[in-house]
Amino acid sequence: MKIFLGISGASGVNLGLKLACEIAKRSELHLCVSKNAMNVLEKELNLTDTFFKNGATGLKFNANQSSAKFDKDHEDAKFVNFSSAQSELDFVGGDERSQAQNGKVADNAQYLGSNVLKFDALDNCALDDADGEICKFDSSEKNERQDTQILDKFESGKFQNKSEFDKNRAQKDKIYQIWQDLQNRAVIHDDSDLAAAPSSGSFGIDATIVVPCSISTLAKIHAGFADTLITRAAAVALKERKRLVLGVREMPFSTLALEHAAKLSALGAVIAPPVLGYYSGQNSLEDMENFIIGKWLDLLGLEHQIYKRWD
C-alpha cells in the first residue's frame, strides 16, 4: 500500500512526523514537508540543542554576527543578541579572555534568554543581580562578585529551570531521531518538485493525507490550485476518487474555512482535525498524541493498537 503524507501546517509538525513514523512501519510512505513546516522543523531542532548534545565547550558571542551557527567541530558558536556590546567574550573552551573596546564591556548587552551556559572565567564582567544581564564592574571587586554571582545564577537554578530544559531537550532529541529514521524508511519529496511520482495518478498512491493541514492548503485544495506537490497530490486523490484525509489544524475555524471543509467533504475528502477523545483514558501527552495518530491510521486503513478502543 502506498501512502502520501503531506505536512503543511506550521503548527503541529512534530505530530505529523510521529504519524509519518507510524505509517512507515506499516506501508510504503511518500513524505513531503512544505517550506513553512520545514522552517518550523529546523527551529525545533535548533542549534542550542545540537550544542549540548555534541558536548561542545566553546561558545562565542560576537556583536557583529547576524546568524547562529556551529563550525564543523562544534567547538565554536556565534550568536547575535549583543547589538550594543562592544567586545567579544570567550567562554568555556575559548581563550578565556575579554577584550574591551573604548572602555565598554557589554554595558547594554541584551538578556541572554533561557540557555543554560557554564562560565569558566569572565574578566571584568558578571551577571547583574536583578535580571541576569552582563554588566561592567570595578576590577577590585571582580573575584568576589564573580564567584558569588556566577554560582548563584547557574548552580541555584534561578536562571533556568534545569528539569524543564532537560524535558525539552529530550523531546527535541526524539523528534530529531524520528526525522533521521524517516530518511531511511520513507521516500521524501521536495514540495516544489511537481515532477515527483506522487503528482501523477498513474503512480498509484492508495491514500493521501495532509497532517497538519494549514488553512491556506485547505483553501488551495478546495479551489483546485496545484502549485505544490502537496496540493497536487490532493488534487490527484480527488480526481482519482482515492481516499483523501485532511487533518486541518485550526481553532477556532472561520466561516470561510468551514465552507472550504464542507465542500471538500462533499467531494469525498475526510476532514479529520486533531481532536482528542477522552474515552481511551489518556494519562500523558504521548497517550493523547497516540489517540489522534491512531484515528488517522484508521482512516487510512492501517491496522494498529496504539490507543485503547471503545468497548
Image: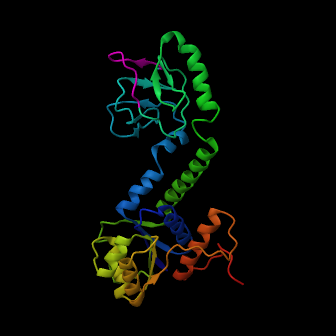
Give the tally of numbered discs: 0
268 to 51, vertically: above or below: below
Which residues make up the magenta segment? 96-109
Residue 79 in picture, x, y percent from top left: 40, 36
**What secondary structure do most residues of the magenta stretch adopt?**
loop
What is the quadrant of residue 238 in the picture?
A: bottom left
Residue 37 in view (yes/no): yes
Residue 146 in picture, x, y percent from top left: 56, 19
- The residue under the point 40% across, 80% down is 258
Residue 230 in view (yes/no): no
Q: Residue furthest front?
A: 130
- The residue under the point 38% across, 89% down is 267
Asked if the stretch drawn in magenta spans residue 89, the answer is no
Front residue (pair 112, 198): 112
Query: Is 292 placed left or right of 80 in the picture?
Result: right
Front residue (pair 271, 1): 271
What is the quadrant of residue 166 in the picture?
A: top right
Query: Is 172 placed left or right of 82 in the picture?
Result: right
Asked if the stretch drawn in magenta spans residue 98, the answer is yes
8 to 97, vertically: above or below: below
